[in-house]
Image (cartoon, grey):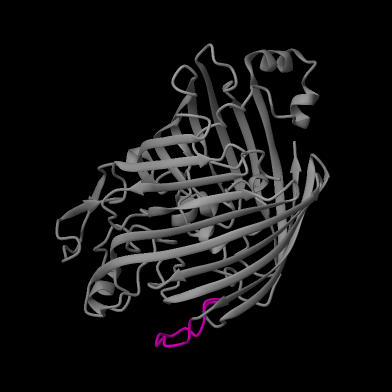
Amino acid sequence: MPYIDFPYGGTPNIGTTRPNSVDSPFMAAVANTSLGKWMQDAHIQVYGWLNGGFNLSTNQNQPGGNAPIGYAYTPNTVQLDQAVIYIERLPDTVQKDHVDWGFRLSALYGENYRYTNSYGLLSDQFNGRNQINGFDFPMVYGDIYIPQVAEGLNVRIGRYISVPDIEAQLAPNNFTYTHSLTYTVDNYTNTGILTSLALTKNVMVQLGIDTGTETPLWNHGVTIPNPMPNALYPGTTMLKDPGNQPSLAFCLRFTSDSGNDSFYPCVDGINNGAWGYNNLQWHGFTYYHKFNEYWNLAFEAYWLSENGIPNLRNAAAQAIVAGGGTPFSPQYVNFNAPPQAYCADANALSCTGNAYGLLAYINYSPDKMNNFSFRPEIYDDPNGWRTATGVPTRYYAATLGWQHFFSPQFEVRPEISFWHSEAGAGYTGPFTGAFNGGTKADMFMFAMDAIVHF
């Protein structure tokens, strides 16, 4: 399985993490060299993977015909999903006698950079040129572990993966090749400080402050000219990214004595919710349950919101966007600007967008080399905001996937999925559905990837 403990974000697993614990082919290959011995003594490891896949879909439009499905958004194609390398030192969270430290430097290249993109960090690849493949550095952080505080305190500083969610950006951390809609349009990374305190063996508290979601520290307070002051942005200048502001993350994790149950409610990226590059106000929880050695359940529910989103139904609002009167107008962001909303009131210039996700993974692992996952999902996007379609709709999806290891270094993940959008019923816009550029309400897809670890 992708995890040994039921997962929680923003910290190494407290009480179970040991240095030099990654058994990678690269580290084994250099073990008897002077470099390898120095790295072992310093508890520094280098490892990574190559991940590529393909999909066969009932959609035809290229690129992007599978959208809003992510990670395989272009139908009937082969792609390099991600080539990833880590340089890291894991703190020892098992011992209780000294303060320890760690870090991770990560680099990613491939199609998947599109989802980790942080506005202002190499983002011209995505927002300026809309490249299919690109680079990103999704994790650049340091850890300080203090075992003398309660059952252990970890402080993480830098850019890190957002705390909630069953799924993750990095391929080996997932049961299936494709991702749910719930995850595809979710928070990905934060930049800031996150503390994780194990109060007891059953209770963990996490508290952090960051710059928001997918926006680096140096965006804070940066202004750009406003060529057409308007009711939404009345000044002669405006913030480059209004979502870049001090933001709160707060989580509680409750684990049963048996370890068979874990309940993990969180809020993430919480601020005034102003329309930003990806200023998502995340409220939700994950729940995990182990039935026995073969079966387990992972469940997630959340509500996302954002305020002041320009109204796709309002001609004046669209004229403001087209004329350069917002921070994300075409004059500033050529491609992949943050989504606008289909507001209930056509007369409003802007509105609050909301979206709701319900997701489950039912997992069966008959042995250590195989895992089967059934992933049902409901995603409600009443403003067409999070799925960037401008189509208010509810989605239903079901995916059946198989994760098979030929060896610890090589795995494949075939899957078959069905996706349905309710768009069309009562919708008076130009689209009749959500897939294939808005022409289909249903789609089937077979997809498979391979991961080679090094």
Q: Tell me: residue 193, above or below residue 59.
A: above
Q: In which quarter of the image is the C terminus?
A: top right
**Residue 179 visible somewhere in the drawing:** no
Residue drawn at (67%, 13%) of the image: 41
Q: Does the magenta stretch include residue 425?
A: yes
Between 378 and 294, the residue placed more toward the observer is 294
**Residue 253 visible somewhere in the drawing:** yes
Residue 122: x and y in percent read 47, 45
- Magenta portion: prevailing SS class: loop
Read off the magenta span.
Answer: 423-437
Image side of residue 395 versus residue 242, left or right = right
Q: Quadrant of the N terminus?
A: top right
Q: Quarter of the image holding residue 173?
A: top right
Residue drawn at (57%, 36%) of the image: 106
Q: Does the magenta stretch include residue 374?
A: no
Between 134 and 74, the residue placed more toward the observer is 74
Between 374 and 427, the residue placed more toward the observer is 374
